[in-house]
Amino acid sequence: VAAEGLLTTYMAARRGLGRITAACEAGVTRLTRVAHRAPCRLLPMADGAAAAAGAGAAHCAIGGYGGGLLGGDVVELEVAVEAGAALLLTTQASTKVYRTKRDGIAATQSLNATVDDGGLLVLAPDPVVPYESAAYEQRQRFMLSPAASLVAVDWVGAGRVSRGERWAFSHFASRNEVLRRPEAGAAPAKAVAVDAMRLSGGAGLLGLDLGRVEYDTVVSVLCSGEEAAPVAERLRMLSSALAHRRVGQRPGVLRAALAEEVSEPAAAAARALLGNVVVGVGVAQGSAAPKGGGGSGGGAGAGALDVVIARLAAEHTEDVFRLLHFAMAPLAPRLGASPYGLRIHADVAALCPIKAGAAAAAAAAAPPPPTTEAARATSSLAAPLAPALSIARGLSIRAPGGNGWVPVQRAISAAAGLPPGEEAPPPPPLALSPRQRARMAHLSDATLPTGGFAHSGGLEAASQLGLLGGGDEAVRRFTRAATHSTATLLAPFAAGACSLFSSPVGKEGPSPAQWREWEALDTALHAQLSANGPARRASAEQGRALSRVGAVWLRQEAAARDLCAAFGDRGANPNRAPHGATMLGALCALLGLPPQVAAEVIAYTTARDVLSAAVRLNLVGPLAAVEMQADVAEEAAAAAAVAAQRGVANAASSAPLLEAMHPCHDLLDRRIFRT
């Protein structure tokens, strides 16, 4: 495809800009810079300005000139909160994302924020609502000074549910990074905590219909700094209160001390909800935190180096507004207003039933699925394009008029007429030697002592808290969602580590550059597991176990044996303890296995471990588990191969409800599994 043809695809793309600077002058925050360009619009709020100024804060809303974002729209925001300033950023309403055009180009939004010492940034938007066949990608980076504070909300709704559009968008990707500003002359900043989601495939694959409950909104809340600590504490109390609400009077399920930790306001907020809500809380204790330690609860005593991440999944948006309003109420004196206060219009809420037949009518009006001939034509196009798409992955070109950078891969797909959201097909099956096949089988065998069977992947928490539902189908849904989510998150790290050590290791061992790259990879994975304490512990335990296994397995190969021992030695250092995926990738390389094998082993062992837990919890029989594993593992292996191609920068989980419920494992009183 000619470069000129690629650029033509993006002629209609619009690049919106927004720049905000908040400075503190004589104890009052003033917006010293407000600039925007369509489709972005910044609105300093006049209503309540006096109250905000009286509290020493400023309030600005992010909006647009149209009803929402179109495919190809690009919005780039830069926010600076100077020392001592306090800024509340909201949105006019929910951010609608309309269906993509035939070129399949997503709407994208980025936010880069810096907060100086003593500053407070509160990002409290309404949800992003992607319509059917919409595509949306978002990246937000928060660079914080040591004494800065941050509360950031990121949430997405299921779509126009009343029209029968429920999680029907093409894809949604969101990535939030919290970084600590380095001192002068220090190494570049690294992410302390990362919260990333990549959603596609409908409610079933996302795990948002477990227990016959339709969860229609997913939220992440990031808290850091002294002024954010009360918010983090309220979120932790809400997690405990909601767990008590689900368990009721059943004794012995939750730790007895939890009841004493929950305040009456938190318990009252939990009792007043319309439907099901799950809240899980995790804490990243800076870059010096031990990987194996710490529970998933946190918030109390959160210091300047801590980032608390709460994940919520709820049936109703109204419940989320109420819970966020309760959690963020301690910020009102500093901001002059309580975030989401204007969204609460009554003390008591009630459901308004949808008119009978509305969903059915919407389904009937939906366009028919593509014919067999159309599907065959798409497949015939995708196969020959695979090499071009693979080469173009991660590359971008400058759009006309300097309107930002656009992905080459998406342009190639659009030029070929592939449907919106079409990705490069999975790589072809591997041609492995008999020795490689034997090593792959041994690496994924149940007898390998890696400790995988000590972990349930959140299944035990889901079962005890009544979130799973009954029957074999409930276990199948959970396993499918958990395996797919774990594969899409961990496969890029495993494949990356394998590629890093793919060249033979000499007697002197890896080069210093290789060690630095591997440690950076492992540190990035640790940051991404911050929101899920049990998953982080399980990953660290299995990484240490794999380093011991490798040292024994490869004892006849001195260089490889010594390298595995070196991984184990570094595992004794809390800053460098190997995680399971990065250790597995390195071990695959030492065994002469390609990166795709590392990705597929991640998928297979995850499905195996979750179903083994289901059998031991008496949720499913052994024979039924065999059939489920054959079904789930094959699908997850394909997803892992595609995720590995995306690379570490796009690694993300894909089951937000499971990510919210997994940290609740640490609330249980009696547990069979470690996580």
Image (spheres, rainbow, N blue to C red):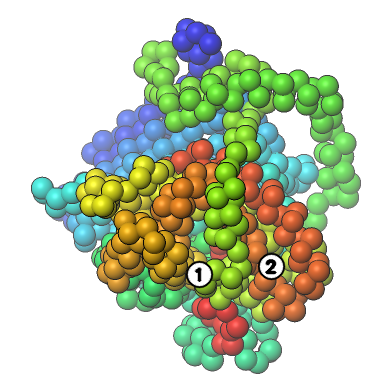
Residue occupying the point 40% across, 44% down: 502
Kindly indicate the quadrant of the structure image that contains residue 622.
bottom right
Residue 124 visible from this viewpoint: no
Q: Examine the rendered structure and indicate whether residue 622 appears above or below residue 507.
A: below
Residue farthest to the front, as pictured: 556
Q: Residues within 10 Å of mark 2 (few under 14, many from 20)?
A: many
Amino acid type assigned to the residue bearing label 1 in the image: Thr
Q: Is residue 202 left or right of residue 289?
A: right
**Viewer-nearest residue: 574 or 548:** 548
Q: Is residue 258 left or right of residue 636?
A: left
Helix, strand or loop at mark 1: loop
- Residue 80: image tag: none
Amino acid type assigned to the residue bearing label 2 in the image: Leu
Helix, strand or loop at mark 2: helix
Kindly indicate the quadrant of the structure image that contains residue 233.
bottom left
**Viewer-nearest residue: 550 or 23:** 550
CA separation, marks 2 and 1? 16 Å
**Viewer-nearest residue: 158 or 663:** 663
Kindly indicate the quadrant of the structure image that contains residue 612.
bottom right
Q: Are marks 2 and 1 in contact (CB under 8 Å)?
A: no
Residue occupying the point 88% across, 50% down: 356
Residue occupying the point 48% across, 24% down: 392
Figure disc tally:
2
Residue placed under numbered mark 2 in the picture:
611
Image position, residue 259 (x, y; %): 53, 88
Residue placed under numbered mark 1 in the picture:
450
Q: Examine the rendered structure and indicate whether residue 136 appears above or below residue 533.
A: above
Image position, residue 540 (x, y; %): 42, 67
Residue occupying the point 11% across, 49% down: 184
- Looking at the rendered image, the disc whose residue lies closer to the viewer, 2 or 1, is 1
Image position, residue 478 (x, y; %): 69, 62
Residue 364 visible from this viewpoint: yes
